[in-house]
Image (cartoon, helix red, strand yellow):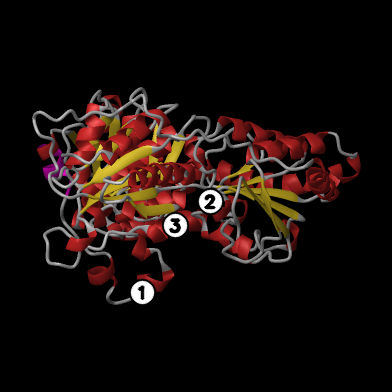
Amino acid sequence: MIPSHVLELSAFCLQSGIDVFYASPGSRSAPILLALKRAGIQIEMIADERSMAFRALGYSLARGKVVGIFCTSGTAVLNLGPAVAEAFYQQAKLFILTADRPAEFIDQHEGQSIRQTGIFSAHTVFSASIPSTDQHPAALIHTRRLLNQALYACLAPTGGPVHLNFPFREPFYPESSEEFKPVISKKVAVNVIRPEARLLREELSFLIERWNAAPKRLLIAGQMQPDHALSNACKALSEYAFCPVLGDASHNLRGPHGLVLHSDHFQDGFLGSEKSKADIILSIGKGHVSKSLKKYLAENPGTEHWHIQEEGYPADAFGNLSRVVNAKPEWLITKLAEASCFSPVKNNSASESWFDHWIQAEAEIISRLPKLIPEMQWSDLLVTAKFLQNIPNQSILFLGNSMPIRYALWLSEISSGKQLDIYTNRGTSGIDGCLSTAIGIADANPEKKIFVLIGDMGFLYDRNAFWTNKIPGNLKVLVLNNGGGNIFRILPSSSGLPEMADYFEMNQAQSSEGTCLDAGIMRFTAKNEFDLESVLPQFFNQISTSVLEVFTDKEVNHSEIQKFRSRIRQVNGK
C-alpha cells in the first residue's frame, strides 16, 4: 500500500501552484512520481540527475516561480548538489524532494543508502525529513506542516531552494485494486499574505534628507534577473539625481542614460582617484564579474554605502556597508528619484559634474570599441564580437562561465540597442551545469530564441544536457573551442607557471561532433573568419536546435586579449 502522506504531497502541490517538476528515474521515488503524475502535474524526466537539477534551475530563473525536483535515493541525491548550491546563491526557488530508505536501513550496507537527512542543509533555506510512517494522525499533520514551512521559506524575498527527504518502506507501487490519487477537496496548502517591504515615513524621510545632501551619488548594480519596473526606477534615479549606474550587463538594467558598463576598460587610476569617490554608494543585486569594480568597492571603506534588499542581511565582502535597507529596491529607488527631482538646486552643479566625470569615461570606451574589432585576428574575442553584432534583438543570452562571460561583458557595447535578457550561473560561477541551465531557460521561453555562449570545457563537462528526449528547438549554442581552459593564460598567478599547459589548461582535443550526432542536432563549424561569415546566418536562422563550434588557438587568444586590453585603455585612443 502506498503511504497516504504522498497523496498529501500531490494535493499540496496542486493547491500551491507547484505545477512543473523535473525528475530522474528510480524505483525508490516511484510513490512521488505516481502521486504527482496521477494528479495531473507536469513532469519532465531527465536521465542525469546533475543535468536535471540545473535544467530545473534554468526554468525557475526564467519563470521566477517555484519549480519541483525529485529523484531516487543514494548517490543520485548527491548529483543534485552543484545545482542546489548554485540555486542557493542565486536565491532560485527549487522545491527539492528526495526518496530515501527508512532510518533503520542507513549505514547497514543496503544498496543506494547514504546519510541523506540534511544533506543539503548548508545550501538550502529549509531542510527536513518527512515522517517515514503515516499510521498516526499526527504524522500527517507533521507532513502537512513541513510542506508549508518549506514553501514559505522558498517563497521569501530572499528565499531559495528547499529540501524535503521522504523515507519510504516497500511496497513502492500500488496494487492493481488500490485507488491511488490525490484527495483534491482536502485543504493542505496554507495561504500566506506577504506585505511589500517598505519603510516607515520617518525612516524614508531620514534617508531622503541624507541623499539630497550628498552631491556625488552612485548606484552599483550586481547580477539580477530582468525586471522592467526596476529598470524604469533606475532610469529615473539616474536622470533626476545625476546618478551614474555602475555595473556590467548581467544586471539586466535597460534605459538609464547613466549606465556605466565598461569600467574594466577605464584607464589605470580612474577608479582609485579622489575624483571618483562617491559620497553615497547605493547598491542592489548580487555579485560582480569585474575585478576592477570589486577593487573600487574594496578601496572605498570610508564611503557611506547603503545596500537595498527586501529582507535579510546582504553579502558584505569588503566590510564597508554602512546601512542595510530592507525595502523593495524598485520602491525605494523610485522614492529617491522623486525626492531628487524636487530637491533644492544647490547640489545640481556638483552632481552634474560628477555625472559627467563617469559618463565621459564610458563614452570614450564606447567610441573606441568598434575601431578595435577590424584589427582583431581570428580568436575567441573576434568570434564573440561578430556574434554580438549579429545576435537578433529581443533574444535571451546565456553566458557560460570562465572566459565567455568576460568576453561578452568586455564587448557589451557591441550589442547595445538590442533588448537582450542575460542569464548566467554566477551564484557559484561553476562550469558544470551551464548548458543544462540554458536548456531549462529555453523550456520556459518557447516563444524566444535562446543563445548560449560557452567554452569547450563547459560544453563537454555538461554534454549530458543533450541526453534527453526533449531538446527545445529554440536553443542555439556557440562553442568556443580553444582546446582547454584558456582563462589560466590571463590570470597573472597561473600564466607564468611551467605546469600551466599540462595541469591547469587540461589540453583536450575533443569537439561537439559526437554529442551533436548522438542527439541529432544540426552542427556548424568555423576555423577562420571567412567560415564564420558563411555559417553565422545559417546558425541564427536554423529553426531547430543548432550548435556552432569555432576552433581557435589559445596562444593567439592570449595575445589578442592582451592587445585589446592595452589598446582600449590607451589615453585618447593613441
> Is residue 305 on the magenta stretch?
no
Q: Are marks 1 and 3 in contact (CB under 8 Å)?
A: no
- The residue that appears at 45% across and 48% down in the rendered structure is 90
Q: Is residue 22 visible?
A: yes
Where is mark 3, residue-wise? Answer: 563
Amino acid type for the residue under numbered disc 2: Lys
Q: Is residue 533 visible?
A: no
> Is residue 514 on the magenta stretch?
yes
Element under disc 1: loop
- The residue that appears at 48% across and 43% down in the rendered structure is 152
- Judge by depth and name the residue closer to the eye, 475 or 49: 49
Element under disc 2: loop
* Image coords of residue 230 (percent x, y): 61, 35
Amino acid type for the residue under numbered disc 1: Gly
* Image coords of residue 267 (percent x, y): 60, 58
Q: Report the magenta residues as a range.
A: 511-517
Where is mark 2, residue-wise? Answer: 286
Q: Nearer the viewer, mark 1 or mark 3?
A: 1
Q: Residues within 10 Å of mark 3 (few under 14, many from 20)?
A: some
- Judge by depth and name the residue closer to the eye, 230 or 70: 70
Amino acid type for the residue under numbered disc 3: Lys
Element under disc 3: helix
* Image coords of residue 243 (percent x, y): 72, 43
Q: CA distance from mark 1 to mark 3?
A: 18 Å
- Judge by depth and name the residue closer to the eye, 125 or 186: 186
Q: Is residue 561 above or below residue 505?
A: above
Where is mark 1, residue-wise? Answer: 496
Q: Nearer the viewer, mark 1 or mark 2?
A: 2
Q: Please give left or right for residue 533 compared with residue 154 in the image.
A: left
Q: Main secondary structure of the magenta part?
A: helix
